[in-house]
Image (cartoon, helix red, strand yellow):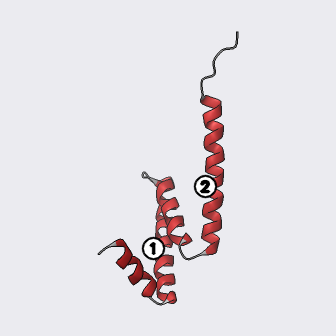
Amino acid sequence: MSRATARTAWTALPHPIRWVAVAAAGGTLVVVGLLLMVLPGPGIPVLLLGLVVLATEFAWAQRVLHRVRRQSSAALSTVTQRFTRREPTS
């Protein structure tokens, strides 16, 4: 099945069925991600994947994902600036 036919089949489903499927899959991934934060495993990537899945149908998840991306980008630039070797000035 190609990507285009899969997308067409997905959008052909009634909205309530898509909504429930996305809510169940995304919610499960978020809960598993939260559990993996305290248990051994990749908690943060699974949590982010759950947000990505939820953001396909829910506006609040899109806002949360946008905020997470913006804050993680700012944190990465701060860490990069702080740990980049600077040439000594003479």
- Quadrant showing the N terminus: bottom left
Q: Residue at x 65, y 53 (%)?
A: 70
**Amino acid type shown at disc 2:** Arg
Outermost top residue: 90
- Quadrant showing the C terminus: top right
**Amino acid type shown at disc 1:** Ala
The secondary structure type at the circle numbered 2 is helix
Label ID, residue 25: 1
* Apparent side of residue 9 relative to residue 54 in the rendered image (left or right): left
* Apparent side of residue 2 relative to residue 52 in the rendered image (left or right): left
Q: Residue at x 43, y 87 (%)?
A: 12
Outermost front residue: 4
Q: Is residue 17 above or below residue 55?
A: below
Q: Earlier in the sequence, mark 2 or mark 1?
A: 1
Label ID, residue 69: 2
Q: Nearer the viewer, residue 49 or 42?
A: 49
Q: Position of residue 73 (x, y in %)?
A: 62, 48
Q: Nearer the viewer, residue 18 or 10?
A: 10
